[in-house]
Image (cartoon, rainbow, N blue to C red):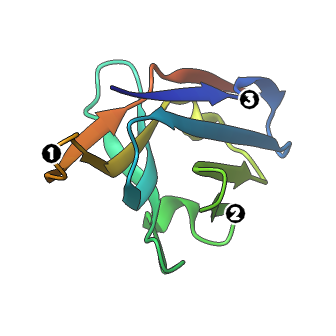
Amino acid sequence: QVQLVESGGGLVQAGGSLRLSCAASGNIFSINDMGWYRQAPGKQRDLVAVITSGGSTNYADSVKGRFTISRDNAKNTVDLQMNSLKPEDTAVYYCNALIVGRRASGYRYQSNYWGQGTQVTVSS
């Protein structure tokens, strides 16, 4: 099985910074896209940023220029550096990864995994 464990959420004042980290462990042959999503109360879960295995990135318009996603393929981790935080960034942030596992038979399969979520609260 695969597990995604997030860390780094918390309470920060507007204009401040936080860094979220996510580590994947378990039956991992390779990892394709890794990303961060967020969900505010009463709203749907939205993409914040995604990074491919090759390092290409894509960001939601609302966070461009403020957030930076990065990954360490050797450690199976993905980070989200969040600067110039705004109250509207308040949400539960979820790590996401498309992970390829391999069975004893050699069969490879891709599955979509989510972390447990970490709360980010930005006060005005």
What residue type is disc 2 on? Arg
Q: Quadrant of the C terminus?
A: top right
Gap between marks 1 and 3, in whole Å?
A: 38 Å
Residue that badge 3 annotates: 8
Between marks 1 and 2, how big is the CA–CA gap?
A: 45 Å
Determine the image quadrant of residue 20. Answer: top right
Q: Looking at the rendered structure, which numbered label has been put on residue 9? A: none
- What residue is at 59 percent from the left and 20 percent from the top? 119
Horizontal arrangement in the rendering, residue 65 relative to residue 53 (left or right): right
Residue 121, placed above or below residue 46: above
**Left or right: where does residue 73 sit relative to residue 14?**
left
Give the answer, above or below, for where 71 lies relative to 104: below
Q: How many labels were placed on the picture?
A: 3
Q: Is residue 65 left or right of residue 88?
A: right
Q: Amino acid at mark 3?
A: Gly
Q: In the rendering, at what x and y percent does residue 70 appear?
A: 65, 63
* Residue in the foreground of this view, choosing between 122 and 4: 4
Disc on the earlier residue, 1 or 2: 2
Q: At 69% across and 63% down in the image, what residue appears?
A: 66
Callout 3 crowding tier (Cα within 10 Å): few <14, some 14–19, many ≥20: some
Which residue is the site of mark 1?
105
Asked if the residue at tag 2 contacts the one at tag 1, i.e. Cβ–Cβ closer than 8 Å, the answer is no
Q: CA distance from mark 3 to mark 2?
A: 17 Å
Quadrant of the image containing the N terminus: top left
